[in-house]
Structures are given as C-alpha cells and as structure tokens.
Image (cartoon, helix red, strand yellow):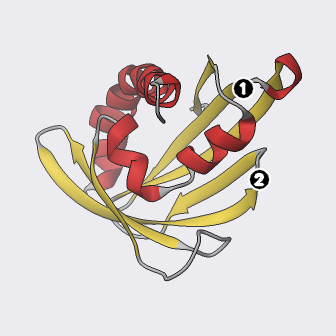
C-alpha cells in the first residue's frame, strides 16, 4: 500500500513551521491521536534523537518510541518507529511560498506492524490515520497561525 500523504499551506515561514513541527512538546497540540510525547535524550532534537509517544489507537493508549533519522532544517525531517506494535515511518517536507512568508507542508506516513500491530495496521491504524492526517494538518495550520504562536 502507498504511504498516506497530505499537503497544507500555512501562513508562517518555513523556519517557524520546522521549529514547531519537530519539537516533540507540540505533538499533542496538533496530532489528534497523540496523548503525550517525551524526549528520551537531552538537548535539542538531532538525527538519532528518540521520543516516546503515547497514542490513542482505537480505544487503547499505546506507547511507542520513534527516532529521528534525518533533520534538514527548515526543509525536511524523517523519523521511524523503533518500538511498539505499530511503527510509523514518516517523511515531512516544508516548501517556502511567497518569498518565505508562507509554507507548504507535506507529510507522508506509512506503518509497519509487529505482533498485534500486524492486524492493527490494516484494520485500525491506516483507516484512522487516513481520516486523522488531514485534520492533524488543519490543526497544525491553526496552531501556527494563532496570534502569539
């Protein structure tokens, strides 16, 4: 199955969008299934940084750990799941618009199931994310365009 892909334009610079989107503390603000996110490493996020994310999948809260593979500020980021029954592989890109005053954000996500996750990915996770990702991107836009953000 192809990765789930969504695109949205945001009235903020690529630098602002990148800083917000790669800061784990903001994850529950703009991702509906994220209950909490906590960095497992000290210091700023870098390639190799790990984050424990607790997500609501169906009616369960499932912790998982993700690791940033690549960070190219303010253009792109890649991460993948390293624990948990459902492991995402996410690629994000930020394209400058209007001489850098606005941004186009593209997020692609796919999943690998382990154990119980093999059944959850096609039956629960992919359908949930297919509905959730457009709403997540809309929430991202609202959070970033809110005055004072």
Neighbour tally class for label 2: few under 14, some 14-19, many 20 plus, Cα within 10 Å: some
- Which residue is more in the foreground, 50 or 101? 101
x and y percentages locating residue 95 in the rendered image:
79, 30
Q: Earlier in the sequence, mark 1 or mark 2?
A: 2
Circle 2 is placed at which residue position? 73
Which residue reaches farthest right?
99
Residue at numbered disc 1: 103
Would residue 115 be visible to someone looking at this image? no
Residue farthest along the bottom direction in this orientation: 42
Percent coordinates x, y for residue 36 in the rendering? 27, 55
Q: Secondary structure at mark 1?
A: strand
The residue sitting at 48% across, 81% down in the picture is 41
Q: Is residue 99 above or below residue 90?
A: above
What distance separates the C-alpha of mark 1 from that of mark 2?
13 Å
Work out whether 17 lies above or below 10. Answer: below
Q: Position of residue 97 (x, y in %)?
A: 81, 20
- Taking the spot 37% from the left edge, 20% from the top edge, the residue there is 131
Q: Secondary structure at mark 2?
A: loop
Q: Quadrant of residue 31?
A: top left
Q: Residue furthest left?
A: 59
């Amino acid at each position: 199955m192809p990765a789930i892909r969504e695109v949205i334009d945001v009235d903020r610079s690529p630098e602002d969008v990148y800083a917000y989107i790669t800061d784990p503390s903001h994850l529950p603000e703009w991702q509906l299934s994220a209950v909490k996110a906590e960095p497992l490493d000290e210091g700023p996020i870098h390639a190799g940084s790990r984050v424990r994310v607790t997500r609501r999948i169906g009616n369960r809260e499932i912790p998982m750990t993700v690791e940033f593979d690549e960070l190219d500020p303010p253009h792109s980021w890649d991460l993948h799941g390293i624990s948990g029954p459902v492991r995402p592989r996410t690629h994000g890109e930020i394209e400058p618009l209007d001489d850098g005053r606005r941004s186009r954000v593209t997020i692609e996500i796919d999943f690998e199931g382990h154990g119980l996750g093999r059944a959850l990915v096609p039956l629960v996770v992919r359908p949930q994310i297919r509905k959730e990702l457009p709403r997540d991107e809309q929430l991202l836009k609202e959070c970033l365009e809110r005055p004072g953000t």
